[in-house]
Image: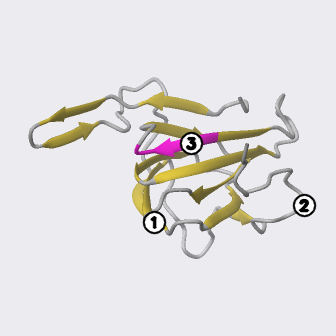
Amino acid sequence: MIDGVKTKALRVIPDERGRLAEMLRSDDDIFIKFGQCYFTTTYPGVVKAWHYHKIQTDNFVAVTGMFKVALYDARNDSPTKGEVSEFFLGDFNPTLLQIPPGVYHGWKCISEHEGIVVNVSTETYKYDQPDEYRLPFDTAEIPYDWEIKMG
């Protein structure tokens, strides 16, 4: 696992009305601080990648659909520099994924319907100076292939 990346298995509580799952609480061991909460959607087969933050920590939860999430550690001072980690999040694996600053991340929606990811980030988005640094999804700088692995 890439240094500083954390996961939290979510406890889903179903009843006759539906389900409830707490994503992130201020008394969780992994809680840092609250910046903002937003959701984003991705259509089936679409890749949203790559970017990282210099300041912000992300806390992703896929609330519907399934996602293949990939991380790449580009931090020069990290003991896991150059490592890639892959996670499968969503309907069949309700998990919070915490991504520290300096780690490139992206995902591909692998479900047959639009997926939704909620992010509780530690910082607010600065429209005039975004804390986002991007590379194309197919960059040669990150050793990762978004294609399905058959066999």
Q: Viewed as shown, does residue 51 lie left or right of 21?
A: right
Q: Is mark 2 on a helix, strand or loop?
A: loop
**Magenta stretch: helix, strand or loop mostly:** strand
Q: Which amino acid does label 3 sit on?
A: Phe
Q: Image point 60% across, 68% down: which residue?
A: 46
Location of mark 2 (residue): 140
Q: Which amino acid does label 2 sit on?
A: Ala
Mark linked to residue 97: none
Q: Image point 55% across, 56% down: which residue?
A: 110
Which stretch appears magenta? 87-91
Q: Image point 38% across, 37% down: which residue?
A: 24
Earlier in the chain: of badge 3 and badge 2, it is 3
Q: Is mark 3 on a helix, strand or loop?
A: strand
Location of mark 3 (residue): 88
Q: What residue type is labelled 1?
A: Thr
For residue 11: magenta? no
Location of mark 1 (residue): 41
Percent of width and height locating residue 14: 20, 34
Q: Image point 61% across, 58% down: which residue?
A: 108
